[in-house]
Amino acid sequence: MVDDETKNISSLAGEDLIKAMEEWADRREHLAEDRTKLAQFRTRLAEERTALANRRTELANKRTDLAEGRTALANRRTELANNRTELANKRTELANGRTELANKRTGLAEKRTELANGRTELANKRTDLANRRTELADGRTELANKRTSLAEHRTELSERRTTLADDRTSLARSRTDWSQSRTEWAEMRNKLAEVRTRMSGARTGLAQARTNLSQYRTILAKQRTELSYLRTGLTFIAIGTIFTRMFGLGYWSIIDAIITLAGLASIGMAIKLFLKSRSMEKRLLVQLEKELDLEAVEKRVDEAIQSHRFGSF
């Protein structure tokens, strides 16, 4: 606010001076002739300048007062800041004191809790001791009951001994009967082993006959293949001869000859393989005749009948 007032005063003084200078410039021509009026006007100007100087002095004094006021305000602000700092420090000290008091209260509460826990543990121990006393009393009662029950068991055991002695005598009598039945079962087991051996022999013979029949079937399939080779060779020879008769001799006769030779080779291979399989077939037929002979079949049937009779027995 003081700065604004000084600015307004200085602006007013400057405007008055400008107006005075303009008036002096206007009147200079009129006053040039009249020196007395000019001297009066100069005196007025000097007075106005003196008034302006006085005003400037007053303004400087006011500025000095304002500066002192500002300094005083700054000092007050500094004092207020220091007071605030002191208050903040005191608040911090109070907060630290409260924190220490809270920690002390927490320690006291923990100690109270420990004491309460100790009391609870003592109460639990007293309860455990009371329970143990009760258990001991119950154990004594149970021991007394067990003594009475043991006496009763002794009498029962003596009675059981007498019954066991009677059972031993009866078991000794039945042991002889079981030994006789055991010997009979052993004889039965031996007979069953004999029947199993006969049946295994018959099964082996039948398996051998099945194997021979499968081999004979294989040989017949092989002979069928060899006959197909023979038929293929004859076909090649027929094709070669037909081509030779149709087209005569020439460059293509080489192919006809190759076809004819392939047919002859196929026929030779088929005859060779057929003779080999024929010999194997004869040997298998001899074995099959022996296995499928009437006497061998009757023997197997008799063994099966005997085993069946023994099983029914």
Image (cartoon, grey):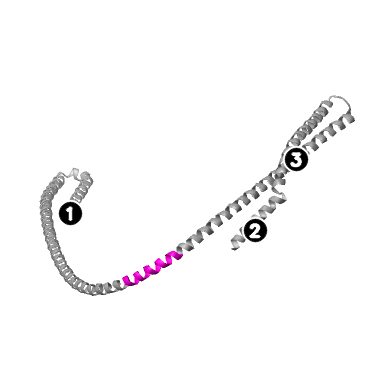
Where, quadrant-wise, is the C terminus in this rendering?
A: bottom right
Which of the two discs, 2 and 3, sits closer to the camera?
2
Q: Amino acid at mark 1?
A: Glu
Q: Eyeballing the image, is 95 above or below 279? A: below
Q: Which residue is mark 3?
A: 223
Which residue is depicted at the point 60% across and 63% down? 312
- Using residue 256 as the reference point, say whether residue 42 is left or right of it: left
- Using residue 206 as the reference point, say whether residue 254 is left or right of it: right
Q: Eyeballing the image, is 244 above or below 7? A: above
Mark 2 / mark 1, whichever is N-terminal: 1
Which residue is depicted at the point 27% across and 73% down? 153
Q: Which residue is mark 1?
A: 5
Mark 2 / mark 3, whichever is N-terminal: 3
- Using residue 296 as the reference point, say whether residue 40 is left or right of it: left
Q: Which residue is at the front of the view, 137 or 220?
A: 220
Q: Distance of mark 2 from mark 1, alpha carbons?
A: 153 Å
Q: Which residue is at the front of the view, 256 or 20?
A: 256
**Image location of residue 155, percent across then percent down:** 27, 74
Q: Amino acid at mark 3?
A: Gln
Q: Are marks 2 and 1 in contact (CB under 8 Å)?
A: no
**Image location of residue 55, percent across then percent down:** 13, 50
Where, quadrant-wise, is the N terminus in this rendering?
A: bottom left
Crowd class of label 3 (few under 14; some 14 to 19; many from 20; radius 10 Å): many
Crowd class of label 2 (few under 14; some 14 to 19; many from 20; radius 10 Å): few
Which of the two discs, 3 and 1, sits closer to the camera?
3
Q: Which residue is at the front of the view, 190 or 5?
A: 190
Q: Distance of mark 2 from mark 3, alpha carbons?
A: 40 Å
Q: Which residue is mark 2?
A: 305
Q: Eyeballing the image, is 256 above or below 210? A: above
Q: Amino acid at mark 2?
A: Ile
> Which portion, as a residue range, is magenta?
160-177
**Image location of residue 44, percent across then percent down:** 14, 48
